[in-house]
Amino acid sequence: MEIIEDQLLDQVSRKAKENQRLRMNYNFHTSPEAGAQRLLNALEPGTELPIHRHTHTAETYLVIRGKIKVLLYNDMKQITDTVVLDPLQGNYGVNIPIGQWHTLEVLTSGTVIFEVKDGPYTPISEENILI
């Protein structure tokens, strides 16, 4: 059993702050081939996530601590929807459908989300990044 508590969140957040990419995963799945990819993702303001999509899975974010802005896009790179997820304001998470272009912006230091996708892990290919 693994308990998701302040000590774990602080540990992963500290690693994110030290990482050049300003983010760090803590995986609960046992391998990249696992059928469900379940992880904590510690994110710091300034981390860059390209606008991307997943063509084989929906993606769910639950904010455990901190605040993010999720942005959805159409094929012409126009924003079609946004939502700020902040558990202190009652907005906890979002489920992003298969094929939906999206990214997020981290609004507070120490933000940690719980992220779930269908596996196996597949790196985002060039055609699934909106340039």
Image (tube, rainbow, N blue to C red):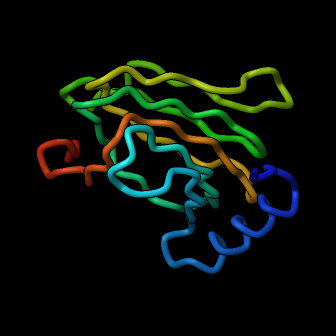
Q: Nearer the viewer, residue 12 or 85?
A: 12
Q: Nearer the viewer, residue 107 or 36?
A: 36
Q: Is residue 84 left or right of residue 36?
A: right
Q: Residue furthest front?
A: 1
**Residue 45: percent from the left, percent from the top?**
62, 58
- What is the number of callouts on the image? 0
Question: What residue do we see at 53% from left, 44% from top?
Answer: 38
Residue 8 vertical position relative to residue 99 in the rendered view, above or below? below
Q: Residue furthest left?
A: 127
**Residue 81: percent from the left, percent from the top?**
45, 19
Question: What residue do we see at 60% from left, 60% from top?
Answer: 26
Q: Is residue 6 left or right of residue 56?
A: right
Q: Is residue 8 left or right of residue 128?
A: right
**Residue 16: percent from the left, percent from the top?**
62, 69
Find residue 53 and report its image quarter: top left
Residue 62 vertical position relative to residue 20 in the rendered view, above or below? above
Q: Nearer the viewer, residue 102 or 11?
A: 11
Question: What residue do we see at 49% from left, 70% from top?
Answer: 21
Find residue 55 and report its image quarter: top left
**Residue 87: percent from the left, percent from the top?**
79, 30
Q: Is residue 17 left or right of residue 55?
A: right
Residue 19 vertical position relative to residue 100 in the rendered view, above or below? below
Question: What residue do we see at 71% from left, 26% from top?
Answer: 92
